[in-house]
Amino acid sequence: MEDLKQRARGISLGIYAADLGALRKAATEFAEWGAGILHFDVMDGVFVPGMTAGPGFVKALDVGLLRDVHLMVENPARHVASYVKAGADIVTVHAEAADAAQALNAIRTAAEESGRPVLAGLGLMPQTPLSEIRALLDMQPDLVLVLSLDPRRKDPPDIATACARVQELRTICGHKPVIAFDGGVTLDSIREIRACNPEMIVSGSAVLGANNPQRAFETMTRID
């Protein structure tokens, strides 16, 4: 598990920001750039407005990178086992889901049944006070994903507040989870985000929508 936590560091590239007609080609290119992590935003049209693809895509995009699945869905406990079975290395569920505690336990059960380590992640919307999720943090999630924006709303990302939350989590999580940052990550904001020292930073369209995506990725990884 500790080895997997070490690998779960760096830029997690949002695969669904790539050409949807050529996802495997894109994933293979990411590996050639030196990327280590693919990020899958899974949305069900209920928990958040958008909809994306299911575990079959996670299975199909096995190109040697860690597969980082972010479940923005209602009742994630029903779905986590299918993503672990598809090969996910990280499965993150939201603290705001009614069955978040059950889902964290389900990830760990599915990982044990699969015979391989899988990081059980907990995602936090910006408006959710840390004081309200202490019981979930006490379950010692392996990864905590801090969002700077709420995909259910149209508010702009609040980078400074999310960075402060990253630092606060470091003081209250004695078990030292991987801290990840997601939302509003661009070449303009990456230096501020790096300053709060998240181990993982999720970025999709800022890299893949650039004129030269590989150069954008390489620049983002170099900035400290």
Image (cartoon, rainbow, N blue to C red):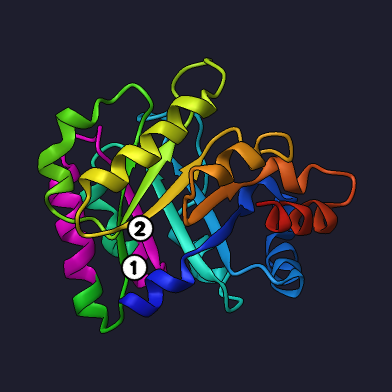
Q: Disc 2 marks which residue? A: 91
Residue type indicated by callout 2: Val
Q: Nearer the viewer, mark 1 or mark 2?
A: 2
* Mark 1 and mark 2 residues within 8 Å of each other at the beta carbon: yes
Mark 1 crowdedness (10 Å alpha carbons): few <14, some 14-19, many ≥20: many
Can residue 87 be seen here? The reply is no
Image coordinates of residue 91 in percent, x first then y, are 35, 58
Is residue 86 a member of the stretch shown in magenta?
A: yes
Give the spatial CA distance, label 1 vs label 2: 8 Å
Locate residue 174 relative to residue 31 in the image: left or right.
left
In this orientation, which residue lies closer to the viewer: 110 or 210? 210
Is the N terminus in the top left, top right, bottom left or bottom right quadrant?
A: bottom left
In this orientation, which residue lies closer to the viewer: 145 or 38? 145
Question: Which residue appears at 62% of the width and 46% of the height?
Answer: 203
Q: Which stretch is magenta?
A: 83-110
Q: Quadrant of residue 34?
A: bottom right
Residue type indicated by callout 1: Val
Can you say whether 178 is above or below 136 in the image?
below
Image coordinates of residue 139 in percent, x first then y, are 13, 53
Question: Which residue appears at 29% of the width and 57% of the height?
Answer: 80
Which numbered tag is attached to residue 76? none
Q: Disc 1 marks which residue? A: 84
Can you say whether 96 is above or below 121 in the image?
above
| Residue that protrudes farthest toward the bottom in the picture | 115
In this orientation, which residue lies closer to the viewer: 73 or 212? 212
Q: How many marks?
A: 2
Locate residue 185 relative to residue 213 in the image: left or right.
left
